[in-house]
Image (tube, rainbow, N blue to C red):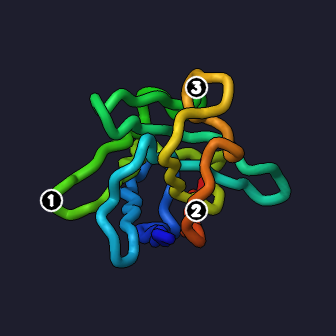
Amino acid sequence: QVQLEESGGGLVQAGDSLRLSCAPSGRTLESYAMGWFRQPPGKEREFVAALLWVGSSMVYADSVKGRFTISRDNTKNTVYLQMSSLKPEDTAVYYCAATHRRPVGGGWPDSPRDYPIWGQGTQVTVSS
């Protein structure tokens, strides 16, 4: 089974930008959808953004809309999360995830249960 590897996390100041990368280990990254989630300290994992592989439609959580952009580079077999205007409340472990099927019941794949494949996560810390 494909494994995902995130990179690009780090410590930044409020207002800075950061780009996270997600690449599979050993296989081509093709799926129904790729998603980014995050888990703030002491909180549950939450949806950030998702990209549908066919058509490249994207959806974002309201909290990051206009600041974060999900994209892919097929030549590099990588999915990115470009984060701008970062805020201290963006501090979290960020995970990428993949699914080869539509969510049960339809709709956007914006729940952790929609994704069977996960990376190990990368820490993003935003200081005020």
Q: Is residue 57 left or right of residue 9?
A: left
Report which residue position mark 1 lands on. 75
Q: Which mark is residue 62?
A: 3
User: Front-most of 41 and 115?
Assistant: 115
Report which residue position mark 2 lands on. 118
Q: Amino acid at mark 3?
A: Asp
Badge 3: few (under 14), some or many (20 or more) residues near its Cα, within 10 Å? few
Badges 3 and 2: C-beta atoms under 8 Å apart?
Answer: no
Q: Secondary structure at mark 3?
A: loop
Q: Secondary structure at mark 1?
A: loop
Residue at the image point whose x is 58% and y is 62% from the top: 118
Q: Is residue 35 above or below residue 24?
A: above
Q: Secondary structure at mark 2?
A: strand
* For marks 2 and 1 on the same chain, the one whose residue lies earlier in the sequence: 1
Q: Amino acid at mark 2?
A: Trp
> Percent from the top left, x then y, of residue 34?
45, 47
> Percent from the top left, x then y, of residue 119?
55, 67
Measure the C-alpha gap from mark 3 to mark 2: 23 Å
Outermost residue toward the bottom in this view: 26
Badge 1: few (under 14), some or many (20 or more) residues near its Cα, within 10 Å? few
Q: Amino acid at mark 1?
A: Thr
Residue at the image point whose x is 66% and y is 46% from the top: 89
Q: Nearer the viewer, mark 3 or mark 2?
A: 2
> Percent from the top left, x then y, of residue 84?
40, 44
Residue at the image point whose x is 31% and y is 44% from the top: 71
